[in-house]
Amino acid sequence: MILLLKDRALLVKPFYKTVGDCAAIALKKFLTLKGLRSVSGPMSAFGLKKIIDTFEESGSFDVKCGRGRKAIASTSVEDVVTALQVASSSALGTCSARGISRTLEMPASTVRKFLRNILQCYPFKITHIQELVPADLPKRETFALQFLARMEVDNTWPWNILWTDEAHFHLQGSVNTQNCRIWARGNPFQMQPLPLHSQKVTVWCGFTAAFIIVPFFFEEIGPSGPVTCTVNGTRYDSLLRNQLIPVLQQRGCVDSTIFMQDGAPPHIATPVKQLFNLHFGNNRTISRHFPTAWPPRSPDLNPCIFWLWGYLKDVVYGDPIANLAELKNRITQHIHNITTETLRSIVEYAVLRFQLIGENGGQHIEHFLSKSKPTSFS
């Protein structure tokens, strides 16, 4: 427990009022005044006696000069915060106390002390981004510039792209412990038991600026009902032929839709590529093994990844889920609730990302986006 100056004074008063200056009785009276059952941390009757000794020796409740944790100058804190932000927004998105210490020319141990104190006041979250290799940068830049150039020729280009991707949804949901913060006076010793192999569904979804397609779940019928299965070329081809193409034909937009997918192996199976050539052709396919190739390691450019899946997992896991059937129903329901205005806003935001990628040589651009998210983001 961290004792403020007034708490130290409150502890000392009952100490001198007790018979024989008893620290244990003084501590008990202090707890009663504060309405506490016990004091968490190192405070004890012995700890109180040390405070008294310090007070009698120096006339102050502060620690002795030259001992204990020293105050941190505000300018030093600002320097470390600035260095931390610059380092975390670098090409690799990584930073370290040693790296910051070299930048500021101060010992790494001092930087670590500053960071511990800063983190107590600023519980900022570390953003995880896909690591890029040097060869990725020109590919990302070229793709972004070509994308923007095509917009100049055809201003309907981005609005007709069908952005697609797959994702796993586990029955128990998932919590990234690196981003989880629990605020409490004492250690809650909270544990969350999870099975080694959690039940899950694998979902495919796609959307344009005008509509979103009902999700498709990769599963096969087993003896006890539907069973989630892995995505391979055959299953992906079946999804496109039997689910997606009929939906686009029903909407009358097969001939205007630009199909986008990342470079996962099932996406470039021979039957899949034949299907793309039949319905979309080279000019309306954004994919590896096609003239307009999706850049590698670029989930930050796909709206399904930087928006859709995160949004769905936030709303789907708002309440406990009993079984996979309920999980699938929730995913479908919340996808139906997404408005056309939101889809349009997300595509506009994707265009902004392409502009920033083109302006910054293919580098990560997350640090530019903190003030530019559309208001329709959930």
Image (tube, rainbow, N blue to C red):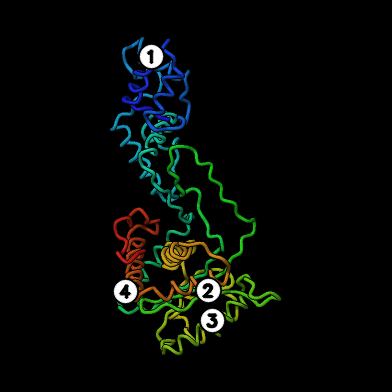
* Quadrant of the rendering where the C terminus is positioned: bottom left
Please tell me how crowded label 2 is: few (under 14), some (14-19), or many (20+) other residues with Cα within 10 Å: some
Of marks 3 and 1, which one's residue comes earlier in the chain? 1
Please tell me how crowded label 1 is: few (under 14), some (14-19), or many (20+) other residues with Cα within 10 Å: some
Of tags 4 and 2, the one toward the viewer is 4
Which disc number belongs to residue 366?
none
Q: Position of residue 179 (x, y in %)?
A: 46, 49
Q: Is residue 104 above or below residue 352?
A: above
Q: Residue furthest right?
A: 223
Q: Position of residue 45 (x, y in %)?
A: 47, 19
Residue appearing at x 45%, y 50% in the figure? 92
* Nearer to the camera, 93 or 10: 10
Of tags 3 and 4, the one toward the viewer is 4
Residue appearing at x 28%, y 32% in the figure? 75
- Mark 1 and 2 residues: CB-CB less than 8 Å, in contact? no
Of marks 3 and 4, which one's residue comes earlier in the chain? 3
Q: Amino acid at mark 4?
A: Glu
Q: Which residue is mark 2?
A: 289
Which disc number belongs to residue 341?
4
SS class, disc 4: helix
Q: Amino acid at mark 2?
A: His
SS class, disc 1: helix
Q: Which residue is mark 3?
A: 240
